[in-house]
Amino acid sequence: MEDRRDVIEYPIVDEIDINGWDLRKALRLQAKSNPAIVEWLNSPIIYREQGSYAVQARQLLAQHYNKARGFYHYRSTASFNFQQFLQGEQVRLKKYLYVLRPLLAVRWIEQFGGVAPIEFERLRQVLNETSVQQAIDALLVQKRQHGEAEVQPAIPVLQQWIKAELARLQQVMPAQDMEPIALARLNQLFSQLLHAQE
């Protein structure tokens, strides 16, 4: 017997990409602080929201987010993208954002102990280094002027900061969250939402 599919996928039409999970899988992923569902719930862009699931899921996420998992995910993403995309003398400017955003998300988790925001400008609040802020300002201007695919010389200030930050983070061991994940509350939400559909 075939397992029932728990992934929702539609063909991409006019650059609209719709996908997701059934409720049971979404809550299981949330219980593990899965980065994809954390970022979906935390996204500032909402095309359509129906029912109480998202509001309640966000409230539970704020209470049981696993900061150590977030730390390791963003650190790994930044390291991989740096090695993959920013090693040459010429780089695509857009790729800096693929490294800077997760590094700033780690700093957010370190400083505030909660889910990092999606918005790059909000994440920049955790950055104290003026020279790096100025380099990012210039990067964003260049990116707007030259487009996403344009190749430019690597930016020394950003290269140095990224290397130093990745080296620093290799020495950091985030505290493991000791609180049990709120499975009972997620189960309660699941049951409540099912009954609401009856």
Image (spheres, rainbow, N blue to C red):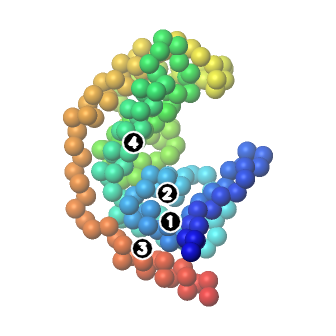
Q: Residues within 10 Å of mark 4 (few under 14, many from 20)?
A: many
What is the number of the mark on residue 26?
Answer: 1
Q: Do the numbered discs 2 and 1 sit on residues whose CB atoms are within 8 Å?
A: yes
| Residue type for callout 1 | Ala
Q: Circle 3 is placed at which residue position? A: 186
Q: 186 left or right of 2? A: left
Report how far apart the C-alphas of labels 3 and 2 lie in the structure: 14 Å
Which label's residue is closer to the chain start, 2 or 1? 1
Three-letter amino acid code of the residue under disc 2:
Ile
For the residues labelled 4 and 3, the Cα–Cα distance comes to 25 Å
Q: Residue at x 48, y 77 (%)?
A: 190
Q: Nearer the viewer, residue 142 or 150?
A: 150
Q: Position of residue 109 (x, y in %)?
A: 34, 46
Nearest to the eye among marks 3 and 1: give it.
1
Q: Quadrant of residue 104?
A: top left
Disc 3 packing (10 Å; few <14; some 14–19; many ≥20): many
In the image, what residue type sits under mark 3? Leu
* Residue assigned mark 4: 74
Please indicate whether residue 106 sits to the left or right of residue 134 in the image: left
Relative vertical location of residue 133 with respect to residue 176 in this rendering, above or below: above
Secondary element type, mark 4 = helix
Circles 3, 1 touching at the beta carbon (< 8 Å): no
Residue linked to disc 2: 37
Residue displayed at 40% across by 19% down: 159
The local secondary structure at tag 3 comes to helix
Q: Nearer the viewer, residue 59 or 31?
A: 31
Mark earlier in primary sequence (4, 3): 4
User: First in sequence: mark 4 or mark 2?
Assistant: 2
